Amino acid sequence: QVQLVESGGGVVQAGGSLRLSCAASGRTFSTYTVGWFRQAPGKEREFVAAISWSGSIGYADSVKGRFTISRDNSKNTVYLQMNSLKPEDTAVYYCAAQSVKSTKYDYWGQGTQVTVSS
């Protein structure tokens, strides 16, 4: 069982930066792929970025070059550094974890609100 807690959300002006954190419980966290997703009002949840247990990384086209995902397994934490934020980045951001044996994200955090003002 893995529990995820996001933090770091807030209100920022366009062009600004935020760093989100996803803190996880569980001794086997280093074996999980962790992804960030977001959901804006009235829209479906969408993929933002993910980092595998081996360090492979993927980004949505909309955030490439602006967002950076990283992990610190010693702290059981995954980060999402968000730079050059745009109003369209406004959403609730969720982190999720997928075990090596799974084909889907099994565990989700409660989300953290990011609001980018123009």
Image: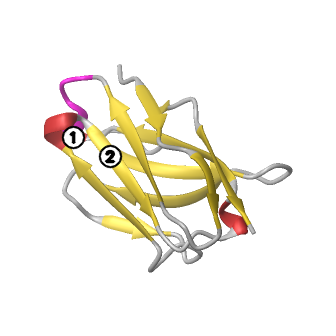
Which residue corresponds to mark 1? 31
Q: Quadrant of the N terminus?
A: top left
The quadrant in which residue 67 appears is bottom left
> Who is closer to the viewer here, 78 or 118?
118
**Can you give x and y, in whole percent of width and height, for residue 23 in the image?**
35, 33
Question: Does the magenta run of residues contain 29?
Answer: yes
Q: Which residue is mark 2?
A: 78
Query: Magenta stretch?
Result: 26-30
Q: Are marks 1 and 2 in contact (CB under 8 Å)?
A: no
Residue 100 visible in the picture: no
Seen from the viewer's position, the closer of residues 117 and 97 is: 117
Q: Is residue 29 left or right of residue 80?
A: left
Secondary structure type for disc 1: helix
Q: Amino acid at mark 1?
A: Thr
Query: From the viewer's perspective, is 84 left or right of 91?
Result: left
Whole-percent x, y for residue 48 in the image: 53, 61
